[in-house]
Image (cartoon, rainbow, N blue to C red):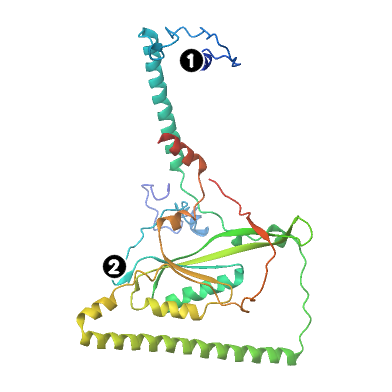
Amino acid sequence: DALLGCHRSYRSRPTHGIGKFKYLLPKELPKRRKEKVQMKEIDAGTEYQYGDVNIQMTSYDLCLVEHFAQYVHRLCNRLSIRVNESYAMPTKTNEVLFLEERGSKMQLDAILTTHQRVVQIRGLSSTFAPILLEVIQSNQPEGVHLSVKQHTEADFKSRLKSRPELEELRAQMS
Amino acid sequence: QMALVQNQLLCSFSSCSSWLPQRVPLRGNHWQSSLLELRTSLPVRAQPKKKKKVDVKKEQAQKERMKKKIKKLEKAAPELIPIEDFITPLKYSESNRVRSLPALSPEESERRVLLLKKWSLFKQKQDEAEKKAIKALVESQQEALKELRLESEELYQAAIRRDEALFPFERDGPSYTPPLPGYDPPEGKCIDITKVYTQ
């Protein structure tokens, strides 16, 4: 800075820019602020098009459900259906206990984890919807439960952490 | 009966710790002018008015404090629940054990490569068949709609509209074996032990 701000013009000299070194260092990317989790606008859709539709796949088997979700995503890409988001819902863990034949004690049978993946699409035309459903159903693997619904705010809120303090204060206010 | 009721009220006002069932009513509460009339228990004097003002101010201050707290909590953006599937448990990254695979013979590796090629060809044929089927479905649908349009415009418009009864759509995946007819499952229960995350 002192070199260029200097009134003495030594730019023609070969010593111009002596002492500069920042151009040699790797470029530092500007720090990205954490993007706030905000709900995107839900498209209601017109008479001839469905708005935001959630294709939810639930199963006990993680690999199956992941691969099926990937398959559905690629299928939508191929059929040029816009995919808004493709995310995973939090896993639910269940402890299964069963009553022993002789005795009244509950015995632990297994710990099952339920996994769910969601592919959100937009702009599905009314004539193409049954075809898409047919294709997805024909490729549905065993043990994977398919559910296709309209996207609602409640669906989005179920992904967020609960805030008991805020809700308590809000209940106290009203 | 009235006396007993008044007794209880008097006890609560004068903050007696033990409630003594007495026939004689306590006269600890001097706000009450007579024993029989409850409605004249609040005399018109200066002190209760002050109490009201202070209460109102206190309530207002409390409300403002609560509003400030709510604003502060609302400022923090809502967070998504972390998904346990994507977090590898530490025990898999701590150990240093390495799997030692046996060496493959050239015939075995040759066989595997040829198998992979056959499998990829099979999958490609399957994919092509699926694309063809989708194309055929769409074409036949468009043709049918064209014919319908020629027949009657009204029916065509009704057919083009979206089906509200389509969603929500639920379907269970196919099962390996059909359910056994006379199966009696043992009694048991399912407990949900999902970790609850709070912000």
Q: Residues within 10 Å of mark 1 (few under 14, many from 20)?
A: some
Left or right, B142 with reference to B58: left
Tell me if label 2 and label 1 are in contact, CB under 8 Å.
Answer: no
| Above-or-below relation of B66 to A41 | above
Q: Chain of mark 2?
A: A
Is residue A170 positioned above or below A29 on the image? above
Tell me the residue at 66%/74% (across/down): B182
Q: Residue at x 61, y 92 (%)?
A: B118
Percent x, y of residue B146: 26, 87
Q: Which residue is mark 2?
A: A46
- Chain ID, mark 1: B
Relative image position of residue B127 (x, y in whole percent): 50, 86
- The residues tagged by marks 2 and 1 sit, at their Cα atoms, a distance apart of 68 Å
Q: Nearer the viewer, mark 2 or mark 1?
A: 1
- Amino acid type for the residue under numbered disc 2: Thr
Asked if residue A16 shows in the view, the reply is no
The image quadrant of residue A153 is: bottom left
What residue is rendered at 56% in x and 74% in y? A67
Q: Which element carries disc 1, helix, strand or loop?
A: helix
Residue B1 shows up from this direction: yes
Residue that badge 1 annotates: B6
